[in-house]
Image (tube, grey):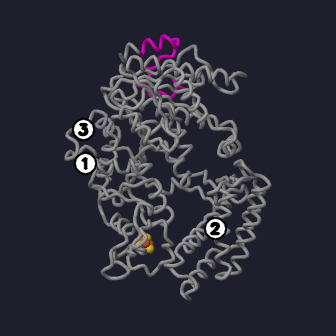
Amino acid sequence: MKPLDLIGSFPYDLYPTIRVSQRATFEGMKGVEGKLIRQLPVGSGKTAIGATYLYALRKQGKRRLFYIAPNKTLVEQVHTLHPDMKVAYGRNEHPCLYYPDEKLRADEIPCSLLGDCPHRVDQLTGETHEEGAIPCPYLQQKFEAKQMLAPVVCTNAFFLYTVLFSEEFEPEGVVIDEVHRLAQSIRSVLSTEITDWKVQRAVDVLDEVSPRQCAKLAAFLVSMRRLVKRHAMDKEVLLEEDQIKRLYEALMTVNPAMLQSEVRRAISSGKLDKRADREILKQLEDIMRSVRRFQHALKFAMTGATERGYPLNFVIAFGKSEMGEHDRVQYKIVVKDYYVVPLIKKLLPKDTLVYSATIVNPELLAFETGIKGDYASIPSGFPIENARIYLPTNTANLSVKSMSDSKREKTKMIRLIARTAKRFANKGIRSLVIVVSNEERTKFLEFAHEEGLKAISYGNGMPPRECAKRFRDGEGDCMVGTTANFGEGIDLPKKTAPVIFCLRPGYPRPDDPQTQFEERRFGKRRWALWNWRVMIDLLQVRGRNIRSEKDLGVTFLISQQFRRFAWGALPDWLEPAYRGDLSFEECVKDAKKLLV
Ligand code: SF4
């Protein structure tokens, strides 16, 4: 096969010139077979690189091309830059036309039980079930995406459901943006939850419709409640294999196919009405789907049941001893699909390009996602003199192990950040503070108040995105948030926050079930994975305030824990920005010289 014509496929109608980093990326991809993994820094024009790759594949006759981004905001950004691509969203982004008076979304209705819907679009012919009916927007966009030669831009979730589960597309070319998040994002999509409330509702309804299946579901409910009550009240608990086995055996007696046909029969005989009983039907549809998925997922949470000889999933139980006024769920079981490598392998064709600004270590990316291929890290075109990464010599080590008095030391470090942020604020320099826990965030706000620093954060009805917007619009001298909320995805360019303080790396909490699962599964090897994740966090945080070649930005890494991995995380081009041998005061002085 002829090599990809990347330069010739570049969309000159959308971008006046090819940037140096784009040209370097295309040169490096020339003639390389198989999957491509690229670390592309901020400002390298990665969306155009991905689009060009797909256009070049199209030129070669490849069809069903996908650009995949982790969330809707990024999908929209890609579509704004490349309006020729077809956007495809999940059901939750489309209205359902079956119940015109109720303004419902396509994920709020029992679609699979409404076979007579006049708006249903045949995915082979594009015709509606009833001639002349308005096509269902969700199914119509899927049909169009299948017909078009243009690449489809969609989220991880849409791609996963349509390619893997419903097998509606067989992609021939794929680009994955922000690939460092892929495994976790697929895990969250595949997390399956079953609650006592949902099962109880189904049992109540099924009594008349399907008494035998109802009795089996009721028996499962008893066993689930008993298990949670005994082991997981007011805390999330990782279930042991014998507990999972008991749940599995109870659930396997339920036959979802039988359940479905009996519900359909009840609809045909008029026992259940598609319009009047919509909510009940939706609950039944949900429970049938959950049972099916649970039966499958629980099996892979047991050692003996998997080909690999170790569990691929883990199961969490949780129960509330006190129910709030609006609480409906008291007991729940969640199955988390952990081992996503085989799924990702199945999803991706040979022609795949994945990238992110923070890959750091391609071997660990392969370990987490199974994606292996030709790797290159492209240098940034931004002047390195505009950036500093400080790891002062005289700040505390905030790891729990390293000091018995780590709580007091942490308080001291949070105070130090508040005081220093105030000193910067006095010079008109704003800052972003990244902490790991909510407790640290609250403490910082308290100290900021005492120091006279105008700090803002989310909470009390204000979501993190809204808070970031207000800060960008000029509110406050300092913004504080956790790594989970502000570590990624918010841009603070043009001196919005030239100073970033990062309190400590966010290693996983020991009481988190995923942490316990990884400990058991990987033993000592887990540290390589955890260090990789905190390295990515570090690089993501650092990148928040330098979004263009004119931006100036410094990052203070406070805890000495960073010393273990910070240098190793830096790509070659970023190394000159690192300052690891100055005291805290010397770092502040140096930062002022750069920023004032
Ligand atoms: S096919 Fe019909 S019932 Fe299903 S989502 Fe579309 S409009 Fe609603």
Kind of residue at badge 1: Ser
Question: Is 574 part of what is drawn in magenta?
Answer: yes
Labels 3, 1: front one: 3
Among the 4 quarters of the image, the one containing residue 527: top right
Q: Is mark 1 within 8 Å of ligand 1?
A: no
Q: Callout 2 environment at 10 Å: few (<14), some (14 to 19), or many (20+)?
A: many
Q: Earlier in the sequence, mark 3 or mark 2?
A: 3
Picture coordinates of residue 432 (x, y %)? 46, 29
Among the 4 quarters of the image, the one containing residue 445: top right
What mark, if any, has residue 291 been given in the picture? 2
- Looking at the rendering, the stretch of residues picked out in magenta corresponds to 565-591
Image quadrant of ligand 1?
Answer: bottom left
What mark, if any, has residue 18 been given in the picture? 3
Q: Callout 1 environment at 10 Å: few (<14), some (14 to 19), or many (20+)?
A: some
**Residue situated in front as seen by the camera: 476 or 232:** 476
Picture coordinates of residue 192 (x, y %)? 60, 58
Q: Residue at position x 44%, y 49% from top?
A: 70
Q: Is residue 38 left or right of residue 494?
A: right
Q: Secondary structure at mark 1?
A: helix
Q: Main secondary structure of the magenta part?
A: helix
Q: Earlier in the sequence, mark 3 or mark 1?
A: 1
Labels 3, 2: front one: 2
How far apart are the two marked residues, 3 and 1, measured between alpha carbons?
A: 11 Å
Kind of residue at badge 2: Val
Q: Is mark 3 within 8 Å of ligand 1?
A: no
Kind of residue at badge 3: Ile
Picture layout, residue 210 above or below residue 447 = below
Q: Callout 3 environment at 10 Å: few (<14), some (14 to 19), or many (20+)?
A: some
What mark, if any, has residue 9 been given in the picture? 1
How far apart are the two marked residues, 3 and 2, measured between alpha carbons?
A: 52 Å
